[in-house]
Image: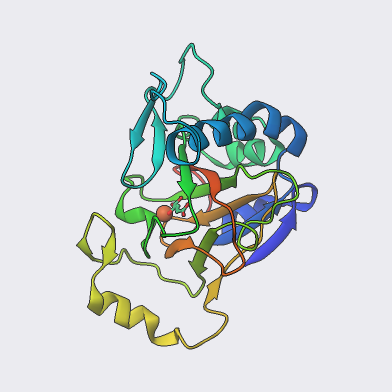
Amino acid sequence: MKYVSADRLSVTDLETARVLVVQQAMDPVSFDTKVASPARALCDALFGTGTRREVPADWVVNWHTRSLVPHAPTGSPSARPAVSDFFVNSPVGQMLRGITSEESYPDGGRLRYQPVDQANHPLHQDCMFHDPPRFFTIWIPAVPKGTTVNKDVPGLELFLPAVSRRLRMEREEPPTVCREDLAQFMTVKDDPDAFVRPELELGDVLMFRETVPHRSHIPATADAPRVSFDIRWALTGAQAA
Ligand SMILES: O=C(O)CCC(=O)C(=O)O
Ligand SMILES: [Fe+2]
């Protein structure tokens, strides 16, 4: 896994990386004001300590996975946090734009609330659930400034050794990888470096390819919930392997 600051990111990084952390990909102050802070307020009201209120008309909620998706990917008149637009307009988004085909754009993103008591998502690959053959998941924390993901709040744990095929599923809800498949690729599970838990701050983005197994992670030191976005960007037409 590679940590790289946005101003040092190269096209080659995007074309070759399976897991990549881009530090300070987005201006944290502006991202917080326009996107992250409203997202935290919405999640807190719906899933956290706030008084539950009506789900805004432009979001669809999944109470089971504590996640929200925009009702319509574009053109909503109300003020949904426009995370995809914000990312597309960032330097990293523009670089990704440059290696993808004309018709390739990110989806509208999902907003998730991960409390400290129970992990929302067991081990899975995103290619189990999403259609494009090759894509990046772009995972963006919407945490307050000064909060570190995978330390102060829950994060994500990713399996680094290359798994190139789609694993079979035993059950979809919650997603459960079938035991035989799990056994095969978990032969390296005793390797302390097999799983990584990248630490991220506001403004950082984590990008990983569709075959990378991953799950929600709750570190013992976490004492507050985490709000995050994840968007998917098809690499159709890209040079990426
Ligand atoms: O945010 C999480 O805990 C899980 C998210 C996830 O699996 C994803 O974004 O693909
Ligand atoms: Fe996922």
Residue 91 in the image: x percent, y percent? 71, 37
Q: Quadrant of ligand 2?
A: bottom left
- Toward the top, the furthest residue is 77
Lateral position of residue 202 relative to residue 55, left or right = right
Q: Quadrant location of residue 103?
A: top left
- Toward the left, the furthest residue is 170
> Looking at this view, is 84 or 16 the one in front?
84
> Looking at this view, is 107 or 97 the one in front?
107
Q: Quadrant location of residue 227?
A: top right
- In the rendered image, which quarter contains the N terminus? bottom right
134 to 2, vertically: above or below: above
Lateral position of residue 175 relative to residue 204, left or right = left
145 to 208, vertically: above or below: above
Residue 175 in the image: x percent, y percent? 28, 59
Q: Quadrant location of residue 67?
A: top left
Total marks placed: 0
231 to 210, vertically: above or below: above
- The residue shown at (56%, 84%) is 192
- The residue shown at (56%, 67%) is 219
Residue 238 appears anywhere in the view? yes
- The residue shown at (68%, 48%) is 204
> Looking at this view, is 55 or 185 the one in front?
55
Residue 59 in the image: x percent, y percent? 40, 26
Residue 234 appears anywhere in the view? no
Report the colour scheme. Answer: rainbow
Residue 32 in the image: x percent, y percent? 69, 34
